[in-house]
Amino acid sequence: MIDKHTAPYGALLLRLALGSMWLAHASLKPLVFTMDGFAQFLVSQGLPGFMAWPVVLAEALGGLAILAGFYGRYVSAALVPVMAVAMWTHVPNGWLFTNANGGWEYPAFLIAASLAHWLIGDGALAAKSAHGAFPGATARGVLVHGRA
């Protein structure tokens, strides 16, 4: 049973933690690996190096949108493919992110948390929240000719 009084604050906590994690993940690239280093990593994985900046910008701007609750649930869903590619690049390194070259546990967790945020919603204190993970769906899950 979901507590209707505290659930919005639980969603807020998830949103704040998730947005912070996306910002940290984005910051790691220019601040630690450098953008040239990240581009070279992408190329080493068979991905185009020119995607380095779009990836960092998507993660950083997405993290800010999630933190603010500006259509955060949809931003979380949109970032899942970005993290799925990151997870794919880390699968050969094993499970633990502390393994050499990082394992896939951290990307997998970010994917799960992002999907949970998409399903739960933005919670309390959201700047511009989207209602419903599936636009047009109803509580019964059926939409017929514009009516439930």
Image (spheres, rainbow, N blue to C red):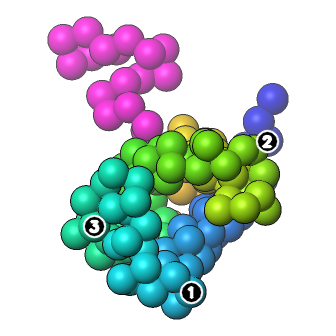
Residue 73: horizontal and vertical position, in percent? 46, 51
Residue 3: give its label. Answer: 2
Q: Give the residue at mark 1.
A: 32
- Within 10 Å of disc 3 (Cα), the crowding (few <14, some 14-19, many 20+) is some
Q: How many tags in the picture?
A: 3
Q: Is residue 5 left or right of residue 80?
A: right
- The amino acid sitting under disc 2 is Asp
Q: Quadrant of the C terminus?
A: top left
Q: Give the residue at mark 3.
A: 49
Residue range highlighted in magenta: 132-148
Residue in the image at 72% along x and 61% along y: 100
- 67 and 110: which is toward the camera: 110
* Prevalent SS, magenta region: loop
The first of marks 1 and 2 along the sequence is 2
Q: Secondary structure at mark 2?
A: loop
- 43 and 80: which is toward the camera: 43
Residue 125: horizontal and vertical position, in percent? 56, 69
- The amino acid sitting under disc 3 is Gly
Residue 74: horizontal and vertical position, in percent? 39, 50
Q: Give the answer, above or below, for where 48 lies relative to 34.
A: above
